[in-house]
Image (cartoon, helix red, strand yellow):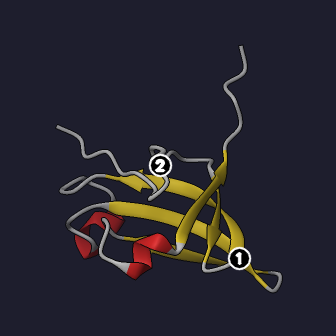
Amino acid sequence: MSKIFHYFSGEIIQPGDTVRVDGHLGRVVEVFQPGSDNLLAHDFPDGGVLTIASWDGIESPMVWQPPDGELWEDLEFIGRKKDSV
C-alpha cells in the first residue's frame, strides 16, 4: 500500500505542485515511497518528497521526509496546474 503525503494545509502532495520552501518558491519534482527502487529511498527509507527551489537565482534540490515537526511545516502548498482535458 502506498503512503500518501499531505501538506499541513491538507492537500495531497503531487509532482508539479508549486510550493514555498523555507520562504523560497519552488516545485515538487517527485514523491517517492518507502522501500521503492528510487535512489533517494536508500537514504530516506520512510519515503519523502523531492523539491527544487530557487535560492537567489540558484536552483537547489531538497528532500522532505514524512512529517517531523517544523521541517515539514516549512513546505507550503501554493498551487497546482489543473489537468488539461
Q: Distance between the Cα atoms at labels 2 and 1?
A: 17 Å
* Residue located 62% across and 49% down the image: 17
Left or right side of 43 for 7? right
Left or right side of 42 for 76? right
Q: Where is 85 relative to 14, above or below?
A: above
Nearest to the observer: residue 76 or residue 42: 76
- Quarter-of-image position of residue 82: top right
Q: Residue furthest bottom?
A: 56
**Residue 60 pos. (x, y %):** 64, 79
**Residue 28 pos. (x, y %):** 57, 57
Circles 2 and 1: CB atoms closer than 8 Å: no
Q: Residues within 10 Å of mark 1 (few under 14, many from 20)?
A: some
Quadrant for the N terminus, please.
top left
Question: What is the three-letter code of the residue carrying label 1?
Answer: His
Number of callouts: 2
Q: Residues within 10 Å of mark 2 (few under 14, many from 20)?
A: some
Which of the marked residues, 2 or 1, is nearer the chain's N terminus? 2
The residue that mark 2 highlights is 13
* Image mark for residue 24: 1
Quadrant for the C terminus, please.
top right
Nearest to the observer: residue 30 or residue 12: 12
- Label 1 secondary element: strand
**Residue 83 pos. (x, y %):** 67, 25
Q: Where is 64 relative to 38, above or below?
A: below
- Label 2 secondary element: loop
Q: Residue furthest right?
A: 57
**Residue 31 pos. (x, y %):** 42, 53
